[in-house]
Image: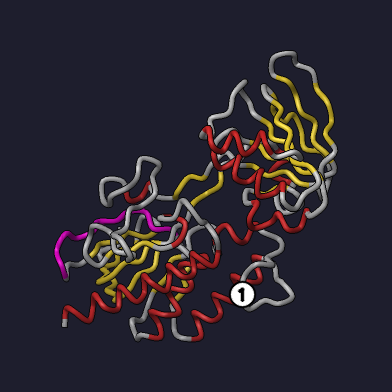
Amino acid sequence: MSDTVEKIKCLIIGSGPAGYTAAIYAARADMKPVMYTGMQMGGQLTTTTEVDNYPGYPKGTDGTAMMEDFKNQAERFGTDVRFGMVSKVEFSDKIGGVHKIEVDGSKNIEAETVIISTGATAKYLGLESEQRLIGGGVSACATCDGFFYKGQDVIVVGAGDTAAEEATYLANICSKVTILVRKDYMRASKAMQHRVMKTKNIEVLFNTEIDEILGEKVVEGVRVKNNQTKETKVVDVTGVFIAIGHKPNTELFVDQLEMQKTGYLITKADSSKTIKPGVFAAGDVQDHIYRQAVTAAGSGCMAALDAERYLGELM
């Protein structure tokens, strides 16, 4: 491990809409932010082929191109964007204290403020065909991608409130929605189950799992299997929405920051502040409700403003 310690005013851990927006605001406030992007530069959005619901792109764009726009804008104002992985953190409990960060197991940083925007990772089934067709009909966000399947037949995989919400949302724009439930009951709240059952163009298949997603470049159908009878059949759909949950990328902060039982970072009401002075969280790492690019960007702005005010109060 290197003995050299780099001292910076604002460290941003993670990229994506939250991180890049925080960087833009922090750079414009002369905080000279340094960003470590993590292994997936641009975050989850880089797995989305088309983005039509972000303001400012009247003709739409794709996720990778949009994140490149964000990155270029952050760099234009002076953000130092670096490819690397934060491997260890030691946050100070004191107001004005120094936060110690280790990058890639070797580089040492001392930061006056830290903005965490490590995001969350969608849970998938683990099928090879599923991974191959992400962006080609397989999605983990109905709100993001449902529009592209207007008037078509789709499948939702999951049994909880998220799956029920995604299915009822899709039912408003799709011809038919089929929910695949692995067990013989749904885990969703009774209210959500009633909403699903009352929606005419939603069909629920219990004891049913995906055996294979069909298609080479785009989804052409799904072979499903009844896990009781072992019978299989092909369901003709063009979209598959995996709704089995998200996992916030917060392992690094266990025993350092306050978290929900599901791992999402807890921030103080109406702010991005964590329990550690000078440490802020933005985007999907602390938002388990909305999980949209535009809300992540908004919280990134909040984090940078909170960090700027924190430093201002120390003067």
Where does the magenta region start and end? 85-95
Residue 298 place in picture, x, y as percent: 46, 70
Residue 308 place in picture, x, y as percent: 30, 78
On the image, which quarter does residue 311 sit in? bottom left
Please, what is the three-letter code of the amino acid marked with disc 1?
Answer: Pro
Q: Residue at x 57, y 57 (%)?
A: 44
Say left or right for 108 vs 296: left
Residue 229 place in picture, x, y as percent: 74, 13
Residue at numbered disc 1: 55
Looking at the picture, tell me which residue is in the foreground, 193 or 313. Answer: 193
Res 83 visible: no
Looking at the picture, tell me which residue is in the foreground, 308 or 155. Answer: 155
The verdict on residue 93 being magenta is yes
Say left or right for 173 vs 8: right
The quarter of the picture where the C terminus appears is bottom left
Binning the other alpha carbons within 10 Å of mark 1 as few (below 14), some (14 to 19) or many (20 upward) gives few
Say left or right for 20 vs 33: right
